[in-house]
Image (spheres, coloured by chain):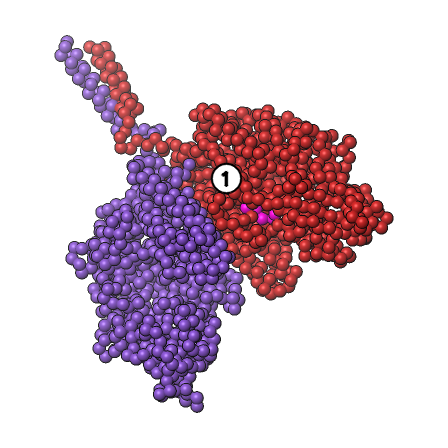
Chain colours: A purple, B red
Amino acid sequence: MIKKLLLGCLCGGAVFTIGILIGHYGIAKSSDSAPSWVKDVAKDVDESLIQQFLSEVDNVNIQENLRELTKVPHMATTEGDEKTVDFLLKRWQDSETGLDQAWREEYKVYLSFPDPSKPNKVTVVNPSETVLHTVREKEKPYTPDQEDPSVVQPYAAYSPAGHPRGKLVYANQGKPSDYHHLNQTVDLRGTIAITRYGGAGRGAKAINAAPYGVVGVLVYTDPRDINDGLMSDSSETYPHSWYLPPSGVERGSFSSDFGDKLTPYLAAKEDTYRIPTSNITGIPPIPIQPIGFEDAYILICELGGEAAPSEWQGGFNCTYNFGGPGFKPTSAFNDSEVKLDVYNYETQVNSSNVMGVIKGSVEPDRYVMYGNHRDSWVHGAIDPSSGTSVMLEITRVLGRMVKQGKWRPRRSIIFGSWGAEEFGLIGSAEYTEEYFTKLSERTVAYINVDIAVFGNTTLTAAGMPSLQDVIFKATKQVSAPGQGSTSVYDNWIRHNNRTSPTHGTIPSVWHLTGAGSDYAAFVHYLGITSMDLSYTFDRTKSNARTYPAYHTAYDTFDYASKFIDPGFVSHQAVARTAGNILIRLADSLVLPFSCADYAESLEDYLKTAVTSYQEQLQAEKISMEPLKRAVASFRKAADHLNQVIQSSDLAKETPLKVRKINDQLMLMDRAFLNPLAFPDKYGFRHVIWASSSAGKPTFPGLADAFANAESSGQSSDWEKVHYHLSVLSQAIEGATNMLVDVI
Amino acid sequence: MIKKLLLGCLCGGAVFTIGILIGHYGIAKSSDSAPSWVKDVAKDVDESLIQQFLSEVDNVNIQENLRELTKVPHMATTEGDEKTVDFLLKRWQDSETGLDQAWREEYKVYLSFPDPSKPNKVTVVNPSETVLHTVREKEKPYTPDQEDPSVVQPYAAYSPAGHPRGKLVYANQGKPSDYHHLNQTVDLRGTIAITRYGGAGRGAKAINAAPYGVVGVLVYTDPRDINDGLMSDSSETYPHSWYLPPSGVERGSFSSDFGDKLTPYLAAKEDTYRIPTSNITGIPPIPIQPIGFEDAYILICELGGEAAPSEWQGGFNCTYNFGGPGFKPTSAFNDSEVKLDVYNYETQVNSSNVMGVIKGSVEPDRYVMYGNHRDSWVHGAIDPSSGTSVMLEITRVLGRMVKQGKWRPRRSIIFGSWGAEEFGLIGSAEYTEEYFTKLSERTVAYINVDIAVFGNTTLTAAGMPSLQDVIFKATKQVSAPGQGSTSVYDNWIRHNNRTSPTHGTIPSVWHLTGAGSDYAAFVHYLGITSMDLSYTFDRTKSNARTYPAYHTAYDTFDYASKFIDPGFVSHQAVARTAGNILIRLADSLVLPFSCADYAESLEDYLKTAVTSYQEQLQAEKISMEPLKRAVASFRKAADHLNQVIQSSDLAKETPLKVRKINDQLMLMDRAFLNPLAFPDKYGFRHVIWASSSAGKPTFPGLADAFANAESSGQSSDWEKVHYHLSVLSQAIEGATNMLVDVI
């Protein structure tokens, strides 16, 4: 009986247990079982996928991309440019390694070209109209591709056509102070000024000259500024080294604004209203033409007049004189004038952006953007094709993962291959104008890689301070080319570092204060958190302003592969770094933005402002306290938000809570926008990173207004300083409001 | 044995079943049971809660709120205003019926007041300096509260002080065309112009006069425009009816811009930069003073000169003459002049907004806002306390539900009791300036209920077309006061309807094109989807411009409770309607916005534009095709999005998909903002609803530019028309981009 009872109990127990098991595992709970998306919404970065990405990025692929992209010159809107459009589309529409979608978008933009049938000329003409010297019209070719008939003649885009003629003077870098100084010795009316690149924007050299009565301007690259003084192409310069040959000429846009010049703050569609060309601002009012140092040498070393100051002296083995005006009495050019014949013309032409996307699986309405321009001046091996080659390798690796079903990012990724950047960041600017609200509301970050490799010494990066952390994380995972097991990070910190109150010694990440590449519209017009990355040369070993073949006919595959990055390993390091960051931005559950690092930058700016301005502002009865309070509030809110993020297990929280925090992080930068802060440059709306001419590492509107008030002493100018203090304080308070508890 | 076996089986079966049940229900699945938030994120409107809300809204409570709010005059920043601040805070901080949090926010604002020690005067003075007539300085009291010493003397806020004196002329409504017409007959230099309210903004009557040499302006309310012609206070006007007594004077702000005048586009904090007062725009350049029709009658009926045109004639039983200038030769005032002594002064004072919130449970970072101003000119029973009484009843009912734990909205609700509205919407404008980005990124909608009840005939509503549907839904659930079982909707459609291509006959919802109340900064500066609601009188039975006691000392509790809404049932209907809409906006899983209704409004505007402008634009070679294409794209995208919403069971989808759609709906209106479209009124950024002077129901920038070009005939003005067409087309395309698939 006991046995039976025990047996019965055992059996009953077993049946009971089986029942429990079936009930628990065998029957799906209808009411409270988790919907399938619960796991999806917690998607976070997969470190093994990043490792896979890093291992698949291939230097030879990048090399072959570059070879293809640089077969012919591809200046904006030319046949060569069209070929690169097709190439990009073909790659991004590839069924095995392409993106989800790729397409082109066109804008009708206002560009400036030289006339191939009437090349621009610069001559030295004596009083009896004999031409004593003619400046070289095209650069001397060293390789067959440099002889391509579609190599554009060196010219200054947006220089007006014209035929000015006058006595030559040397105006250093063409800064306002240079002309001011020169004008104290030489009557500049009716002169032609020769200037060297650097110190002032290209177009500014002519804009600054015109008020003094200068009628034409020449500009050249001084060997001291680009070649560490070297000049001879028989042994020193390319094709023997990376240095610029004597006939090399830097082309460029001489417009100082960005975006299409006829459709400011509107997208340049076919039917868009165009302003009259006479209303265009920021372009040279007088003809200007760039020349090589080979010719500049001949002109400058013959100049008469007083010797220019020592800071004006360059790399030529002669004294740089002001000009009499004109040449020395002892010169063969004595009494001769310099004549410019500029035949540039302006035209409205269609320029394409090529766009491609990988759709996000969880938050398709959040965009991580990655872009570079596609157009070059000539073959553009380094500028911009090094960046395009890197972008294509990133899209190949990611595209394949997507096509193979191995990966789909949490957020959408949008790639942009911008057109007509060289003429003033036009493709990217028009894109931001067309899609303003959509981009502004949905874009998490923009990554720009234009010139991917200036040299093979170290990574360099610029960006919003909130991105510093993710840049560091990525660079620690990539090995530095040619440095054994050293990481890009460790190599970088060796070359460029600073001391952070929070982090100790860290690599220096620069600020995106200028408009040097396509990040400009994203940063300044849209207020999108952005960064710009490249590998560069050792600035302790060369004083070159940039890589010497910049914007010349020598920027070819041969040059890039022999002298900039043999083996394409620096390209590879940039692709790995940028791609790593891209994946992290696209996949992280919580955006890897550090507002505390932003606070540190604001504190730095504040410190400089207080040191530089406070005493004088007190004398003017203008208080800096609101600005100090604003920066302190920002710091407090940033630290608090950081703490909230770190102390929660957000993968277990409602996805709306995570989204809330991500929106705070994403949108904080928008609060720094003020479309009325800079009435003479509405494209600059970000009051922390706007361009500034005051040259102080501090808040730009404040710095410029202060410099202006200090120089004029007028009370209305001091009022503008007060105005900018209010704009800044309220913008920073507005950003703080994005970070504090949302209710 | 069989029995035992059966029993064993039964027992075993029972045990097995119990096991299954325990296993299924009793043990939580660790890996795939739904997190507790899965249900929460699907929270949607609870119709039974709305019914509960409707039943709890009490008319007697509203009446008692109004009694309390109107005890003393509460002009902005006065002691009476301060009392209402305390009252609001006490109610919103109540432990049983209050909100989660309530607080005050202060701005230092620039206001204009009359000097109590030197009251403004208007006199008729003859050549021998004898004062023949003095205009009444204060309104005649009929009840004790109208004798309150803090009743402010009638004055024109922001009129400069001054003592102009001259011959009187009658200038109708003071429109540009009125002065132009008058000036063809009378030399206006040195004259005083008397004008009637209506037709032009208050300040505009003086701004338009100054160019003609007019030195001072009077303004009064003509009995034809406000009293259906009635004039006698012995039987016809208040205290016998709602009509304005003869001595009643409409006060008001005579500034035409909104927001603090010294801190344009910046929040008026203590330390904010102030522009010099000489740079203030949009205020009267010459003294202006409002008077009652009792005195206007005496002045106008004595005027000499030609008879004014019939449209200029008003309700007085005499012919309105232009003025000789001055009075008739037969008048006792012959040869006399009118003298204004205006002693207004400007001062910077602290004005408070009172803010209160109910935190959202699911999407705390989405705000539904509800607001009204608190300040009045005198007792302000109708303007604005009817609205404040309604708001307080809504917050009482909702607050109690929250405190009792019965309800918490999906989204956060923010209530605002704005200060200094009467001086130019200052409190709300400063608030939007201070919290620009935060509000812009997070605010779903703004509901404004200022004057809740103008009369007790029908509801009237204005707002973005996307809100039409939710307004209709709510009004169908509220019964119309005094109409038995008729709904507010059915009553409304009887009084004001239109034919919609989509919906057939529906009530007319007006557009928020002006800046008549605190919605202005939300609509025009922030581009937030907004509405304004009230109950009003039967316009087929009265031609009154507004309720007759508007901005006078007669707008008291007595007046409101006897003549505007006896029993407070219209107040109750507004509270129920507005509260119903508020709950729907706060609780709906998918925002109840219809973009298709927005499309219909754009199509209406387009139709008017094409009919009115196309022929002439073709002659000027300006194409309307881009605008047509833009509206068509918007329609297509709106219909598509509607279809996506209707065809999905979003309660079962990932909350991020719902959020994505809600963000599309919420942010679409932002795409219509262009801060540069109207350089002379940057506060107006919404290119569809901006104010316009052209008087056409179409796109405002286009209409104004067209009117201007048509009148000047200059090609540069036609270019501006083209510019506005591009601005519009691109804004509408931008809005379309918010509605199409997000990637």
Q: Residue at x 44, y 39 (%)?
A: B366
Residue A246 x/y as whole percent: 29, 77
Residue furthest out toward the left: A3
Residue type highlighted by circle 1: Glu
Q: Residue at x 48, y 26 (%)?
A: B94
Residue A594 x/y as whole percent: 32, 46
* A455 relative to B437, above or below: below
Q: Chain of mark 1?
A: B
- So how many labels did they put on this image? 1
Q: Residue at x 22, y 47 (%)?
A: A48
Residue furthest out toward the right: B330
Residue furthest out toward the top: A1
The magenta stretch spans which residues? B255-260
For the residue pair A551 and A213, the one nearer the viewer reads as A213
* B436 relative to A296, above or below: above
Q: Which residue is mark 1?
A: B106
Residue furthest out toward the bottom: A128
Residue B652 x/y as whole percent: 39, 36
Name the quadrant containing residue B517.
top right
Quarter of the figure that contains the N terminus of chain B: top left
